[in-house]
Amino acid sequence: MTNPIVSIIMGSDSDLPIMQQAAEMLDYFGISYEMTIVSAHRTPERMFEFGKNAHLRGIKVIIAGAGGAAHLPGMVASITPLPVIGVPVKSSNSIDGWDSILSILQMPGGIPVATVALNGAKNAGILAVSIIGISDQLILEKVSSYKTKLKEEVLEKAIKLENKQIK
């Protein structure tokens, strides 16, 4: 298998059903990735080691999902030169997901984290692919084709709906 260029990390295996959606999008676009658990609170040494060395291993984008206090995306962003996409996850200890959203979204100046919607790992995967596409024409063309496909699907649905109303 090709060396991974995207890393999908999450604070707990309970985040896996959501974060799997990012992996599915990376699979769709043929992007190699790795996936693991890195807890900011329970394994801080692992998190620091991961964040400091990801770019040295050939990783280009990090997708980090976390629920509750959701410090993982921001803490990793603080120690890596790579773009980090944060996925707020609505978890069992969550305040309707708002704690996760705000923890990831409200980063201090100088430590950006691109933040997608609550449980929005699918969009995180697409965003990671788009970032990689900046320097890879083939990937950029795949993203363009994907968006054209989305447009065509919507137009087909619109025609079906409009035809039902004409009767």
Image (cartoon, helix red, strand yellow):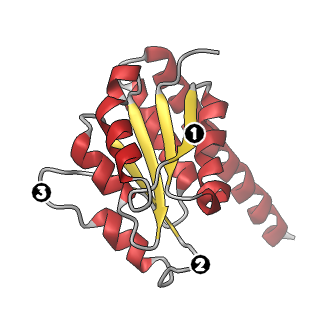
Name the spot of residue 64 as percent of width and height, x first. Answer: 44, 50
Q: Residue at x 56, y 43 (%)?
A: 36
Rendered location of residue 89, percent (x, y)? 52, 66
Do labels 1 and 2 touch, CB within 8 Å? no
Can you tell which mark lies on residue 92? 2
Is the residue 163 above or below the residue 100 in the image?
Answer: above
Hey, what amino acid is under mark 3? Gly
Q: Where residue 27 appears, x then y in whole percent?
A: 65, 32
Left or right of 21? Residue 40 is left
The residue tagged with tag 1: helix, strand or loop?
Answer: strand
Tell me the CA gap for discs 1 and 2.
22 Å
Q: Residue at x 66, y 52 (%)?
A: 154
Q: Nearer the viewer, residue 21 or 7?
A: 7
> Dot 1 surroundings within 10 Å: few (below 14), some, or many (20 or more)?
some
Q: Which mark is residue 109?
A: 3
Q: Which residue occupies the foreground of this view, 119 or 138?
A: 119
Looking at the image, which residue is at 33% across and 29% down?
53
Rendered-image quadrant of the C terminus: bottom right
Residue 84 falls left or right of residue 6: left
- Which mark lies nearer to you, 3 or 1? 1
The numbered dot on residue 35 is: 1
The answer to which image quadrant residue 142 occupies is: top right
Amino acid type of the residue that numbered disc 2 sits on in the rendered structure? Ser
Work out which quarter of the rendered image holds the N terminus and state it: top right
Give the label, 3 or 2, closer to the camera. 2
Residue 46 versus residue 116: which sits nearer the camera?
46
